[in-house]
Image (tube, rainbow, N blue to C red):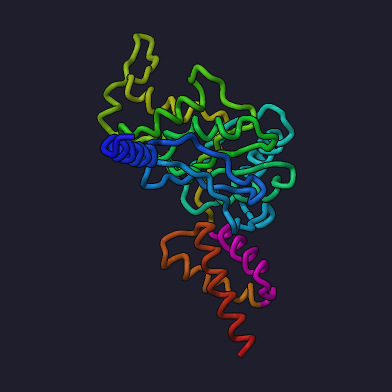
Amino acid sequence: MNPSFERLMQRAEALIDRIESVLPRPLSAPDWSASHAFRYRKRSSGHGLLEPVRHVASIALDDLKEVEPQKERIQRNTEHFVKGLPANNVLLTGARGTGKSSLVKACLNAYAAQGLRLIEVDKSDLVDLPDIVEVVAGRPEKFIVYCDDLSFEDGEPGYKALKSILDGSVSASSANVLIYATSNRRHLLPEYMKENLTYTHTADGEVHPGEVVEEKISLSERFGLWISFYPFSQDEYLAIVAQWLSSFGVAAGAIEAARPQALVWALERGSRSGRVAYQFARDYAGAHGAEAGA
């Protein structure tokens, strides 16, 4: 073979290898036995991976207090799903720190033994939802695709991808996949005062939203189940504090004595959320344990 031609072929093969290394590859399945929770991650090369979560949050449904109606609704929906019965995509909205994401994690732990799995996807990666659904479609497990703190700005590509996969794509979503999302926004997109001007009024007083408002409502309406969360009252906040302190092994007398400190803690943070209650309980239980061991 001509030496010049051979060198040319070697350079061509090297160039092809470099091009192939940066081209998107089909999403491959992970080791499904490695965990019952996975994260979808996009590498700088553009390749997506499903990575097992090695240490899954151990929160249980019984750990969550003062959200009984919300807990009952999401638990019922999830139980239907793992049993192969009809179930809805879920949008959990409302006040921050009230247990939205914790409820999703607790449901995973409650039903993992029955084949429930969770895949966490950042909103920036929602454009790859069809690829994720394709990978899990043939699996016997039931998959929750979970997006935390979901909201969109105008024009973000993930908005259209999520809207399509929820309801509207020409291909039906897999029967073993549901979308669970949490958000502080009911309609997931920013709303502006000027959009109220697009409402129209008929002669008999009926009100019709304009196209901009309709578009912003249409995504949240594709979630079959809406679960709303509200700020906690002082008594509810203290009940949550007591539950977490008890779970950390703090004695009943010490829990009662901690109430004033718990209220000051919440006042300093400007919130009586479940998250604040949990953070106080960790701080107090740590100090209480340190004093007991001193």
Q: How many marks are shown on the rendered structure?
A: 0
Q: Is residue 249 magenta?
A: yes
Visible in this render: residue 43?
Answer: yes
* Region rendered in magenta: 234-253
Q: Is residue 268 above or below residue 191?
A: below
Q: Is residue 270 above or below residue 116?
A: below
Going by the image, does 206 lie left or right of 71?
Answer: left
Q: Quadrant location of the C terminus?
A: bottom right
Residue lying farthest top?
203
Q: Quadrant of residue 225?
A: top right
Residue at left 51%, top 27%? 166
Visible in this render: residue 191?
Answer: no
Q: Quadrant location of the N terminus?
A: top left
Residue at left 34%, top 41%? 14
Q: Is residue 292 magenta?
A: no
Q: Quadrant of residue 157?
A: top left
Q: Is residue 254 above or below residue 274?
A: below
Magenta segment, prevailing SS (helix, strand or loop): helix
Going by the image, does 211 lie left or right of 74?
Answer: left
Going by the image, does 68 lie left or right of 47?
Answer: right
Q: At which x and y percent is residue 138? A: 64, 30
Going by the image, does 267 lie left or right of 146?
Answer: left
Q: At which x and y percent is residue 133? A: 55, 32
Q: At which x and y percent is residue 58? A: 64, 58
Q: At which x and y percent is residue 151? A: 40, 40
Residue lying farthest bottom?
294
Q: Quadrant of residue 65?
A: bottom right
Foreground pick, 13 / 112: 13
Residue at left 41%, top 61%? 270
